[in-house]
Amino acid sequence: MDAVVRTPSRLAAPLVHRLFRDPARPPVFSEPVPGLVSWRGARATATPDEVHRTAADLVHLAAERHAAPTAELAPVVDVLARTLLAIAEVDVTDADAVRLGPQDYARRLRGAVQGADRELSPDAAWFHDALLVSVCLHVLHHLVRRSAYLQRQLPGRASRIAQLVDLGDAEAAARHAERPEEDVAFEAEYAEWVARRHGWLTIVGVDFPNAPDRWPLEETYLSLEAEERSGGVGGTEDEQRTVLLADRALEDHDRVLLRGGAGSGKTTLVQWLAVAAAREGSRVPFVLPVRRFAREGFPAPDDFLHAVRHPLADRAPEGWVVRTLLAGRALLLVDGIDEAPEKTRGELRDRLRRLLRVFSGNGCLVTSRPSAVSEGWLSGGGLAEEDFVELSLAPMSRDRVTRFIRDWHSAARLDEQSRSPGPRERERERSTLDEYEQRLLHSVRIYRELRQLATNPLMCGLICALNRDRAGSLPSGRKELYDAALEMLLQRRDPERDVLYADDVRLQQSTRERLLQKLAHAMLEEDASELTRERAVGILDAALPAMPAARAQGDGAKIFRHLLHRTGLLRERSGESVDFVHRTFQDYLAAKEIVARGRFPTLVDHAHQSEWEEVIRMAAAHARPEECAEFLERLLAPAPALRRPQINHRRLMAAACLDHVTELDPAVQRLVHDRTKNLVRPTTELAARGLGWVGPIVLELLPDLGQVPDDRQALLLACTATRVQDDAAIDYLVRLRSRAALPVRTELARGWRHFDTERYAQEIIAHLDPDGLYFPVADTAELAALRELGGRPRIQVAGVMRAEELLAGLLPDQLTHLWLNAELPDTDVSWLSGFPRLRVLRVNPRLPRVRNVPDGVEITA
């Protein structure tokens, strides 16, 4: 189904005019007109029957031009007619409507029609809502054209509405125009290339003897969850954290800004969406890694393929990209806005926003690390139709970690089975992998350090590979994990794959690592995510004279080829540039090089920048005790050139480093505590949540809860402590569990996904007053723990779970209120008939509409 419904103005305008014709009213107004229309009495501009006939004409006109649920057009007509009748009911003047814009005005009208969502299937409801936005656009255009007042008082809005109508006409014409044969042929070739290029997933560390370096995406892709925040203040029921399947985000929203940490799966999601669009033919995907054009700026449409050095760029028909955008058939996948230098991000954003304004109707996903851009960074300057929905990739739940580990080992077994010489060898290898899988599942459940690391696909992949590589003996900390991964990739990878003579370069791990550090450090200094081949070779040539063992093996070009093909850490882009397979490895190696060179002043100079956070933490982990002490003292020193928030950021970085340091002068530790203790008095929920990244050290700086009588301050402290992913936080939060304030209890109930489920359930959840409190469950482990406590009357489903899992985990004799705040794989909820006490079903309006709700259950949003 198309992402939007376009109705040409030449066809829609006469139908809209039917609704507003009124010879008794002058055509030009000098002030806002209340009421807009009336459907009854002497001043009626149209009768309800005429409104219904107009709605039918609009629906059938749109159905002819778009994929529509033809079997359900009659109910769509009825709902649209009632929605249009609401124009006379809502308290909105014509000026108010124009200020709202078509999307928000459509929402206002839709909100005035009660129960309409129950009458339509999800597809029919989508078609109605998309058509309503189009109709509202033409209604506003009609109001503007007939009112000199609106044209004079709201010139920007009036111009924008006219522009949207003109663009809609152009896109509708282009959408239904016959495409040139050369476009059709090239698009088929391009789609095949996208499916082939992006249909494989490289899981870092999956390196068995003679095993392939990549895996089919469809066999290894794990659908991740994303959170959308909306509504009121944190810790209250008005604030909703809607849980969506990330790969379905663009089904419900045209424009999405997706935040996620390093290794969280952002790029893999981009691959998945690109391949799905190419195979389905629903959209033409354009994968646009920002690192490719970070310095040149966001490319013009005709330069999309050249900017990313696409191998088919020279073969694309002239104007093909523009025609695709004009038809509203493009899917722009802008990956890694954080990989552009900070000073250029604003210009990239403005160019992207202008492009989407000109070519409306196209889908767009932008990915970024969480703190690289501010909230609302991609908003449309107050125009709701240009806003991006902001989602954040959620840490992998325990259920998804379990599934990842099982899928990983299943793929490994299939690969081993295909290469084992005989049935006895295959059975032995299968038994070994079965044992490793069970051992790892047990370890992830039992060991807190391992559980904290296994929160995203990159770390889970590394853990699986290292568990297999080390026969179940895993490192516990993040630094140790990366050390082990580098040992596996740089020293043992080729010998254990029986790749001994791929080239004649023989280098030890330490030498390989130092050379890679040079490349990573250059990228960091130059604020670049990749290097040209010539630049990389030049860096190695400059380093070789000081490294005799490497110099004896060849020149920079030869060493570059060796590192590229034999380390598994670098990848080449179209033969012109090189980058690291993951930014995390780049940051880790750059930190080691900075420590080796003693360049700590460079770290201090950049400590207020969010993109340097990982480098600074890892540098502190690698530094010698004296170096680390001096470095932390510099972070705490006065910085007159910085603003107060930047100074605070530097000091909190010093506190965050303590969690990674092995040895440090106690006097410096006390200094860090003294200089940062007053920074952990947050005044907003956003600031309180942000303190969580500092780590367990923040718990020592928070005030004594016994001296915090104010519930508002208690809520802020709960927001901070629940995000410190260490079980020591439970001891702090225990003192809040008896608070009566609903926001505090809500925040405590939300927090258990960050901790050991059973312990948190016993020490916190079991003691919370259930009155008015929805208890969230994000996975089956939490559902089971809540069942063990005897269930609760109000449950919020805050993670994606199947109906059979909910049936097994919810107690029928307890449940009275159910809040669906996450996508259900199946929207049929007839299974709720098994809960006789259920009175209220609360459904987030951002989720697909549920079907077959049992009688007697009230649905509320």
Image (cartoon, grey):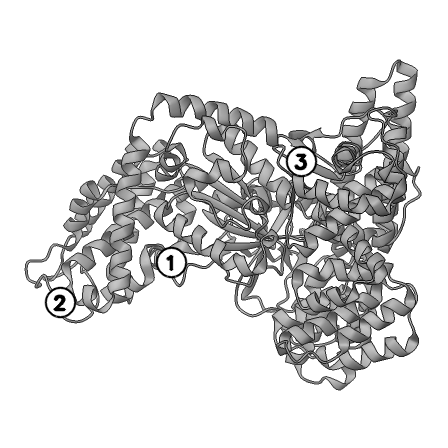
* Residue type pointed to by label 3: Glu
The local crowd at label 2, few if under 14, some if 14 to 19, many if 20 or more residues have their Cα within 10 Å, is: few
Q: Measured along the vertical axis of the image, is residue 140 above or below residue 533?
A: below
Q: Position of residue 573 (x, y in %)?
A: 63, 36
What's the residue at 80%, 66% (across, down)? 657
Between the C-alphas of marks 1 and 3, the distance is 52 Å
Q: Residue furthest front?
A: 545
Q: Which mark is residue 687?
A: none
Residue behind mark 1: 111
* Residue type pointed to by label 2: Phe
State left or right for residue 722 relative to residue 368: right
Q: Position of residue 154 (x, y in %)?
A: 25, 66
Residue behind mark 3: 572
State left or right for residue 179 relative to residue 289: left
* Residue type pointed to by label 1: Gly
What's the residue at 32%, 48% (across, down)? 132
Between the C-alphas of marks 1 and 2, the distance is 28 Å
Name the one closer to the observer, 589 or 117. 589
Residue behind mark 2: 29
Q: Earlier in the sequence, mark 1 or mark 2?
A: 2
What's the residue at 85%, 36% (across, down)? 437
The local crowd at label 1, few if under 14, some if 14 to 19, many if 20 or more residues have their Cα within 10 Å, is: some
Report if residue 495 is visible in the image: yes
What's the residue at 75%, 58% (across, down)? 615
Q: Earlier in the sequence, mark 1 or mark 3?
A: 1
